[in-house]
Image (cartoon, coloured by chain):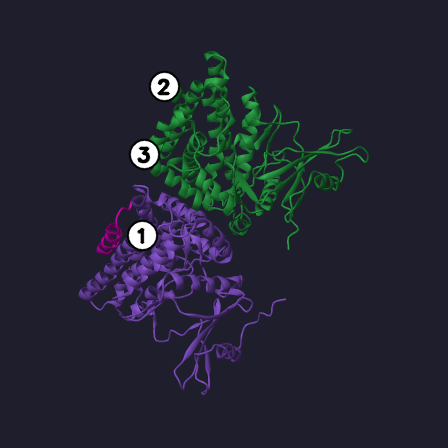
Chain colours: A purple, B green
Amino acid sequence: MSHYHPLTEQEAIEVARGIAGVFGPEGELGCREIGDGNLNLVFHVSQASTGAGLIVKQALPYAKVVGESWPLSLDRARIESEALGIEARLAPGLVPKVYHSDNELALTVMEDLSSHVIMRQGLIDGGVYPLFAGHISDFLAGTLFFTSDLGMNQQEKKTLTRSFVNPDLCKITEDLIFDHPYTNADTNSFDSHLRPDAERLWADGELHLEVALLREKFLTHAQALLHGDLHTGSIFVTEQSTKVIDPEFAYFGPMGFDIGAIIANLLLHYAAQEHWSADAASRKERRQYLIGTIRDIWNGFERKFRALWNERGVDRIAKTAGYQDDYMRRLLQDTAGFAGAKAVRRIVGLAHVADIDKIPDASARAKAQRLALAIGTALIKRNRRISSVEEIIEIADSASRE
Amino acid sequence: MSHYHPLTEQEAIEVARGIAGVFGPEGELGCREIGDGNLNLVFHVSQASTGAGLIVKQALPYAKVVGESWPLSLDRARIESEALGIEARLAPGLVPKVYHSDNELALTVMEDLSSHVIMRQGLIDGGVYPLFAGHISDFLAGTLFFTSDLGMNQQEKKTLTRSFVNPDLCKITEDLIFDHPYTNADTNSFDSHLRPDAERLWADGELHLEVALLREKFLTHAQALLHGDLHTGSIFVTEQSTKVIDPEFAYFGPMGFDIGAIIANLLLHYAAQEHWSADAASRKERRQYLIGTIRDIWNGFERKFRALWNERGVDRIAKTAGYQDDYMRRLLQDTAGFAGAKAVRRIVGLAHVADIDKIPDASARAKAQRLALAIGTALIKRNRRISSVEEIIEIADSASRE
């Protein structure tokens, strides 16, 4: 029988105290539960006398969403800690250090990132992160290449997929990203002024076919070990540092899903400039910064991924003339399509983003929402014809000029 | 510690005697090992007084190929018996009945099919199997649809993939089908008169790109639970009955790999008519029979698969307008490409087919081999542009007219 139970703050302190070399021998430890309480408990254990701290994260056996709760496997805590271990090896310095994990208690003890801010909030507050594109393209190239058949022994990859079968969390994505936004589902949530826009989504056959094809890739294309939920709320930043957290959705899926997630969230913030920029000039400047970041992420990713392919590829077939170019083209197309799906769901689906939802003025908010929908649907519809990241950028820019 | 050891004939008799309801209470049981000894022991246990029999199949912990031996996981016996169980449910009457399995001894006790012949030999002997296309299209439609995300709950499918991670056997396919035939590999084996043809294969960049793309699908596209080795040597037939055996290569992969395997082996036999038909008229008639069987298999499969999709689909997304047509088009293209790869490897790769290798006259054999290579390479090169099974047939017919 499992001895699983949700920890109390006192128990979290005891777990943290068991980690050697973090806290000083004297000085009280304090504890605060800082999670949003939907899926996990997140305890911040800290020592005032030394400034040292740790995070104790524990999965809850259910998800609380819109007041309801449904059961959710605790196995996701094991998946998260194993994914963090792999990411730490393949993208050094870009994930929090893990000190301890306990699968039965579904908990992971990790580095305290209080010196960082969640990137979504950082962006809302006007932050600029000049090293971010370099860091996240390192993360994407390293984790995706070395867990794919290009950079990993194919038999070891097959064995590793067994550890990342993740039905519960994948189900959330399958429903909330690839299904519900495109039909009148109970879980959908949107401002009433968006009803005509939502109804257009629900009736758009061309869009539905592309979403069905993207969903099929999510269901069947075991290309690499994904983070699986790589939005700007899963990234801690400072001007100098980037730390990717929360890989509990990790599974073997299509690489473009991770790359697209980042790009989508930058595009959502781009759309949100209808409010967050004080005037037209600063809006233009802010958007140029975001577009430049998207460009740098894709181009950096492509350059690094191709370099790994050329220098660290595991077999001769990958060297077949024309294969790498064909692969990168399909990867960019997947990235565009998944970015579009990730943007649309944040406007009409269950889970939104603060960048847009926190715009107080209804008219500015509606404008941002419609811009995000226009960009998202254009990316989805055109995904299979995209041949350059500049086309993704042009989709955003032309939608914002309309 | 495992108590695995290769069974003696006497032990096989004891295992068989433990199966209730097969043998009469009196009368000796005889035993003969009838396997080819490369991968498995296959004991035929029979009772002369009643005519009753059973097969006791046991995996060996190594593969013997070209005199060498390499280790091979015994887990494939578990995979085989579990796959047979699933196939029996989804394609009733089309696989041997399993009476008993023992994962530690890596053995499966199953129905004796002595009343049937191996289809490859049956075809070589001039056999005609009028019900085969109907049976095998039932098998393909049932097993592939109901283990895909179209016909199976997506979360249960993910859990099931864990049981069919099959690195050792997939490695054989990856090497012998998608790699070695396209380079000067030690494992390749071909008649010396074929060296110029082999060298053309090794230098054909257009072909290599298509093979790399097909291999990528084999590695990453977890579409459905495949048989994984569905050639005419894995099928027992009579005029009335079809039984698919030996699913030890089973894993979640692209559906077209199974459909293509059947078609490839019929095309190899088509090429082999350079010898097995006595004259031009009988050759033409025999080829029309084989072509008709290929047409009936694809058309039967497509009709049945679409019917299952329409009547037994598990979710609303699969009903998206245009999605089914797009899916079937891609499936046919995969089928053509994998059929081509399966044909080529049987001419220049390690493992050949008796249909062609047993042609005694070197000149007729060379003609058959070159015809098989012409059909195989054309299927591979054109696979992404195929839009009808008639194009596959036209490729075979036009190659045979040259």
Quarter of the rendering occupied by the N terminus of chain A: bottom right
Which chain is indicated by disc 1? Answer: A
| Residue corresponding to mark 1 | A311
Residue A265, compared with residue B309, is above or below; it is: below
> Tags 2 and 1 in contact by the CB under 8 Å rule?
no
Residue A179 in the image: above or below residue B175 = below
Q: Is residue A392 magenta?
A: yes
Q: Element under label 2?
A: loop
Give the number of the disc on residue B203: 3
Q: Are marks 2 and 1 on the same chain?
A: no
Which stretch appears magenta? A385-402
SS for callout 3: loop
**Residue B343 x, y percent position in the rendering:** 44, 30
Q: Check the picture and name the quadrant holding the C terminus of chain A.
A: bottom left
Which is more foreground, mark 2 or mark 3?
3
What label sits on residue A39 in the rendered view? none
Badge 1 crowding class, 10 Å Cα cut-off, few under 14, some 14 to 19, many 20 or more, is few
Q: Left of A76 or right of it: where is B242?
A: right
